Image: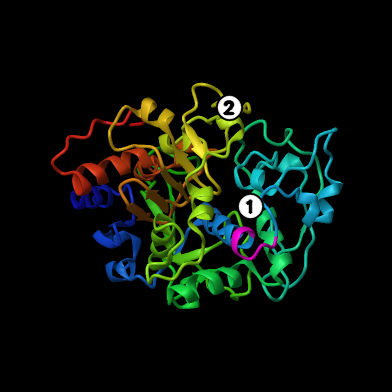
Amino acid sequence: MTLLLEWLVKTEQLPFARLLVARKGRRVYDRSVASEQSGVQLGDISLDSTLWQIDSVTKVFTSFAAAICVHELRLFSWDDSVGKHLPDAHKLKLDGHRLPTLQECATHTAGLPYDSKFGLGISIKPPFATPSVACDALGRMSLRLQGRLAHPPGVRFQYGWGHKVIAQVIERHTNSSLLAFLQTYLLAPAGLPSSDLQAAPVSNRSIPLCVGLGKQKMAGMKSGDARGYRCQRQRSVPHNLCVGGDGGLHATARALLALAQTLDAGGVLPNGVRVLSAHATDHMIGVNHLPGDKFFPARVLQGNLLDGTTDNGSVVGFDSNGSLGFGLGGYLTTDQTVRLFDTDFIRPRQYGWVGMNGVLFHVDLVERVQVLFFTQLHQSFFRPELAMPGLYTMRKPALLLEYVYRNLLRPRVQVGAASAT
C-alpha cells in the first residue's frame, strides 16, 4: 500500500497524500507521503491537528448534525416540508408540485441541483459573503430562495445543494452556526478541541491547495511547460465565515475519524459517550432512502460525474441498472452494488462520500472498517483533460478501496479487480 502512495507522488500524479485505516476501534494503517515540489512538509501531513479542506464530505457532518436535531433534540422531522421551516421556500416556482422534504434535501432528490440556471438568489449580509452563501457576524447563513425546481421532488437523484437548506434549518432552530453546533455536539463530547473543525483555512495549520495542470498541452503554454500541479497555501481568513452545509468545512483527521467511528459504533463516540441513538444512526447510514428502494448509477464509486447526469449532460433518474443507494449525506452500497462490481471487497452497508479535492470518507458497517484518504488537489469536472491522472484514480474510490482491502485487511485473500477500474 505504501509503495502505491509513493509511486503516485514520485510520478507527480499527487503532490502529497495520507491514508488512514482503522478497524474495530484501532488504527491499522497510517502513512503519509509528499513530494518536494509541493512544498509541504511530511510532518505536517501526518499531524492529526492539520486541517484539510473536505469539500462535499461536509454533507456527512451536516447530516449527522441534522440527525441529532431530529432524533435527540426533537427540533424537526426528516419528513417536514422545507416550507415549514423556511418561509422563503414558498417563493419557489413549483409548477404544481409540492415542496421537497428535508429528507429529500439530504438525499439529492429535492430538485435543487447545482445549476446556475436554477436562479438561486442570495441575501447578502456583510461583512462576509460568497457566491452561494452569506453570513452574519456569528457565521450563520442567510439564504433567499427563488427560482424553479429542476424536477418534482422524489423522482430522480440529481446532485445538488439541498444540504444548504438543512444547514439553514439547523441554524434557525438552534440560533447558532452549523460550525458551532458541530463543535458543541460532536467535538466537545469527544474530548476534541473546537479548532478541529473550522469554516476557513488557518494559515499555519491548513494544507496548501493544489491545482492539477494535467499532462496534456494547455492553451497558451508551450509544449513541455505544463508541470504536474501548482500548490499555494490557503490564506487565513476570519473564522466566522460560515459553513454552507454542502461544503465549506476544514477538518482534521482525528475529527473525521471520530465521526467515522461514531457512525460505525451506532452513535457512540470513541470515548464511550453516546450522542445519537443506534436507530437514528442506522437511519442515516444503513437505509437506502431513495424512493421505492430504487438506485442511482454507481458514478460515485466509478469516478464519473457526481451530478446524476449522463455523459451528454441529460438528467437521469433511477433505473434497474443503478446500483448505489443513498443514506443521508452519502452513498450506500447495496446487493445491487455487489452484483455490479463482482468483487468481494464491496459488500452491502458501506457508506461514504468523496470531496472535490480528494478527501475520501468511507465506513464499512459489516467489517467495522473506516478508510480516510487525504490530498488537496483540485480538478475540473468540466475540463477533465486538465485533471491529474493520479487524482482521477483517487476519485475512483472503488480502486483505492480495492488496494486497501487486498493489501491491508485481507492480505491472504485475492481480491478480484473491480469493474470500475
Mark 1 crowdedness (10 Å alpha carbons): few <14, some 14-19, many ≥20: many
User: In the rendered structure, which segment of residues is drawn in magenta?
Assistant: 70-75
Residue located at (60% from left, 59% from top)? 71
| Type of amino acid under label 1 | His
Task: Note whether 136 is above or below 246 in the view shown.
Answer: below
Determine the image quadrant of residue 393: top left
Residue located at (45% from left, 78% from top)? 193
Question: Considering the numbered disc 1 on the image, is that residue within a helix, a strand or a loop?
Answer: helix
| Type of amino acid under label 2 | Phe
Mark 2 and mark 1 in contact (Cβ < 8 Å)? no
Q: Residue farthest to the top?
A: 320
Residue 328 picture location, percent across and down = 55, 48
> Is residue 379 rendered to the left or right of residue 410?
right
> Is residue 343 rendered to the left or right of residue 163?
left
Task: Note whether 341 is above or below 373 in the view shown.
Answer: above
Q: CA distance from mark 1 to mark 2?
A: 21 Å
Q: Check if residue 72 falls in the magenta segment.
A: yes
Task: Looking at the picture, tell me which residue is in the foreground, 10 or 302.
Answer: 302
Residue that numbered label 2 is attached to:
318
Instruction: Note whether residue 144 is visible.
Output: no
Q: Of marks 1 and 2, which one's residue comes earlier in the chain?
A: 1
Residue that numbered label 1 is attached to:
163
Task: Note whether 138 is above or below 366 in the view shown.
Answer: below
Instruction: Note whether residue 156 is visible.
Output: yes
Task: Note whether 381 is above or below 31 in the view shown.
Answer: above
Question: Considering the numbered disc 2 on the image, is that residue within a helix, a strand or a loop?
Answer: loop
Residue 396 picture location, percent across and down = 38, 39
Mark 2 crowdedness (10 Å alpha carbons): few <14, some 14-19, many ≥20: some
Give the colour scheme of this rendering: rainbow
Residue located at (39% from left, 49% from top)? 362
Location of the C terminus by quadrant is top left
